[in-house]
Amino acid sequence: MPILETIRLEKRFGGITANHDVNLVVEKGARHALIGPNGAGKTTLINMLTGVLKPTAGRIMLEGRDITDVVPHERVRLGMARTFQINQLFLDLTPLESIGLVVSERLGLGADWWRVVGTRSSVTDEIVEVVERFRLTDVMHERTARLPYGKQRLLEIALAFTCRPRVLLLDEPAAGVPEAERHELLATIEALPAEVTVLLIEHDMDLVFSFADRISVLVNGSLFVDGAPEEVARDPRVKAVYLGEELDA
Amino acid sequence: MTVNTLNAKNLAAPAANVSAYLKSRARWSPFEIAFWVFAFATIWLFPGKHLILKDTAILALFALSLDLILGYAGIISLGQAAFFGLAGYFAGLVAKYGIVNEPVVALVLSGVVAAALGFATSFLVLRGSDLTRLMVTLGVSLMLGEVANRYSNITGGADGLQGVDIEPLFGRFRFDLYGHNGYVYCLSVLFVCFVIVRRIVYSPFGLSLRAVKGNPLRAAAIGIPVKWRLVAIYTVSAGIAGIAGALLTQTTAFCSLDVFSLERSADLLLVLIIGGTGYLYGGLIGAVIYKFLQDWIANLTPQYWQFWIGLVLVVLVLIGRDRMRNWIGTVRGAVAGVGVRLLPRSITLGGAAPDGP
Amino acid sequence: MLTILFDGVAYGMLLFVLACGLSVTLGLMNFINLAHGAFAMAGGYCTVILVNRIGIPFALGLPIAFLVTALIGGLFERTLYVHVYARDHLDQVLFTIGLVFMSVAAVDYTMGSSQQFVQIPEALQGQFNVFGVGMGKYRLLIIVVCGLLTVSLQLILAKTRFGSRLRAAVDDQRVARGLGINVGAVFAVTFAFGSGLAGLGGALGAEILGLDPTFPLKYMIYFLIVVTVGGTSSITGPFLASILLGIADVAGKYYVPKLGAFVIYAIMIAVLIWRPQGLFARATAR
């Protein structure tokens, strides 16, 4: 059974069709990349997967369960978390507080209004683990707004990761990261635990082909080609519409 | 290096560190302790000023309630007076008709009634833009004002609720004309409410509110039920505003229609803006400054103090709240610096500030 | 019954003239101007001074009130408001409420706190009786004047170059800037014009609404209702909302006088819950 699946998913804005007849299948434990030229409908698709947008038609299945009508924060509880193309961080909180927040939310302590944050060792242990994993230790007490961009990008992923998702959606994680901070980011993404299924939306072909074990190509709102990286790279149609220029460049 | 290679020993030290840091955020600072010691000292220091101090304490509590939703949850409201007024009338009516005679019990009940209204109206407030929120919050308080006016046989209408007889506190302390017992009562209630609010703010729930205010989109994306958190805090805030309103009725033995007025809500915003939002003491400090400013201006030009209040608002905005906050931050930093030097205890506080493992 | 309808329409028309400037500033700059009523009050007091004290004819007093208020509005826009556009809504609310407080106290100081009446020419007093329906002459005048204004506003927006620029700027500020439209200038002119209309409304309405220093506070909620219920995407929405509000208010005060404005507030809240973007807003809210 695929862990994440869309069935004839469709989204229209007025007269414009952003996505049409999308049947995406993401297998458990996959490193799945979703690529496509600008305006192909990638962001609309991820917004539907996470519940920010409501599809016009079609269903979304997570581990065999229909989640089409489930609100965004419930989807997180059901095991799907995302990052954003443009950082969506809590700028007034420190990374430590941000991660602590996610941990306590996940453990169901978020409605606890009496106990002081940080009094539970289970929470603090996990905070330390995440901070280490995402190389945020030396900046964990800084206000997020002051972090260098690469660290903010890492925190962006860290927040989603801390939700302990079974499916993690990464929306252009490397976008805009300066060359000097890039290696750190890519290494961290590489080191994500194998049991977490990753759906990566990315423009950066180096990252896609070094990371993904399966690639889906979205063109004009529909799935165009779907297969292993070698197949996709060889596919003449893909080269024609999209990859050709990028790979040759 | 990933977590897999980290052994438990490596993890223990930073975990303790993180825990200490998180807890240190919530620890009472010397500044805070000094603040409250001084607040209670005013009972003996300024016995002749108890009436205005009492009003200040009520205003501070009211402002604290607004800070909870404005400073911590980002909801702009022009209708906090709805809760203040409802509980004010409730406290007056239960005392007048002898339904609940013990002031403290009546006070708690008034808070519960206001919180219930807050819960019911929170669903209206959560929808729409800032302007819609302004309109709905304002509309609710104006509606209540109309209702109180309509049922003047119960509320006294435009003449206000007369003949309220408040029983002595704990059967012993009567609310006197000079506000002595009233001030001690209000200040104690303010302190208790403050401690509760402070716990809330430093709890995981409080942290999640700051997250919701900072970025509601991401808050939902990490699994926070944004709507319910806002409903909860709006309800709590309404309850505290209600307690403030009930305090006013109990200590003045009177309640009039202007508890619902727009001016009351607008003045409250000013109080909070003077003191600064989102750090708990804003409402308290703002209330002190506002009350004494009002007292002073009213002595100079009794009729036109509203003009000066308006001018303060306009100037505050033109200067910019951020810039104000920076100035205040500098002053506060200096004060805290002095505090650190004076009190050895706070050195451990600084020591908890971490160095990477 | 028909008289109530008539009075309601007159009242509604008046509200529209008073509030339409606010609707445009809100729609254009997403600016919450709670001080709009202060400009209306300025127009009202201007007419009182001109007509009652100096003895200028009423018919001449109205356009002067418009011009004076527009001038004041333009001045305030250029010197004060322009600094607050980019701020958050809280700042805007604080700033404009501050202006309201100042205007209330300033008028109280200079003109006294008692209610003022504009001396209306005798020809405009009294009633017509058409088919058994009593129609106040002055209210008829209001309907005619406001009706003409509404039509000409619609024409200005629909036909003129300025109108199309304004609509472009309301629709999408960034695109409008890209097209070389000076959004700041468009807004200054609109703000002044909207203030002028409010002033004219205040002058015309002094008789019906009552003019005293608390005017901006008393009617603030009414203007805001017109704008929020009507939506800000066109002037048709606020117009319809004004008429509805006018009729509902007059009828409410006639049939259930004891409830006062309760009905109005209840309806407003219901509408805002049902359609947060306004009753007549475009359906495609993005």
Image (cartoon, coloured by chain):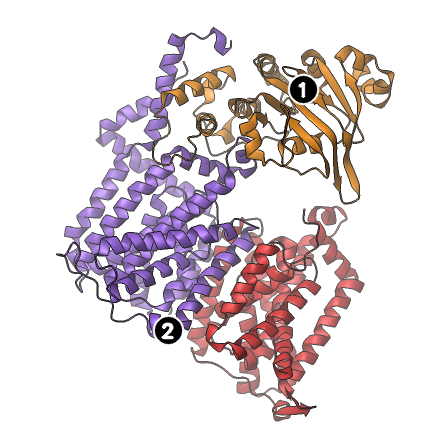
Chain colours: A orange, B purple, C red
Q: Which SS class for mark 1?
A: loop
- Locate the N terminus of chain A by quadrant: top right
Q: Quadrant of residue C60?
A: bottom right
User: Residue under circle 2?
Assistant: B152
Outermost left residue = B172
- Give the residue type at disc 1: Pro
Q: Which SS class for mark 2?
A: helix
- Give the residue type at disc 2: Ser
Q: Quadrant of residue C200?
A: bottom right
Can residue A183 be seen here? yes
Can residue C193 be seen here? no
Please tell me which residue is depicted at 23% across the width and 27% down the height of the picture: B345
- Of residues A175 and C242, the one drawn nearer to the viewer in this rendering: C242
Please tell me which residue is depicted at 25% across the width and 60% down the height of the picture: B250
Left or right: where A207 falls relative to C31: right
Q: Are marks 2 and 1 on the same chain?
A: no
User: Residue under circle 1?
Assistant: A2
Left or right: where B125 falls relative to B286: right
Alpha carbon distance from label 2 to label 1: 67 Å
Badge 2 local density, few (<14 within 10 Å), some, or many (20+)?
some
Q: Are marks 2 and 1 in contact (CB under 8 Å)?
A: no
Q: Identify the chain of the residue marked 1, using the numbered disc in the image.
A: A
Measured along the vertical axis of the image, is residue B84 above or below residue B204? below
- Locate the C terminus of chain A by quadrant: top right
- Of residues C248 and C178, the one drawn nearer to the viewer in this rendering: C248
Give the numbered dot on residue C230.
Answer: none
Measured along the vertical axis of the image, is residue C148 above or below residue B239? below
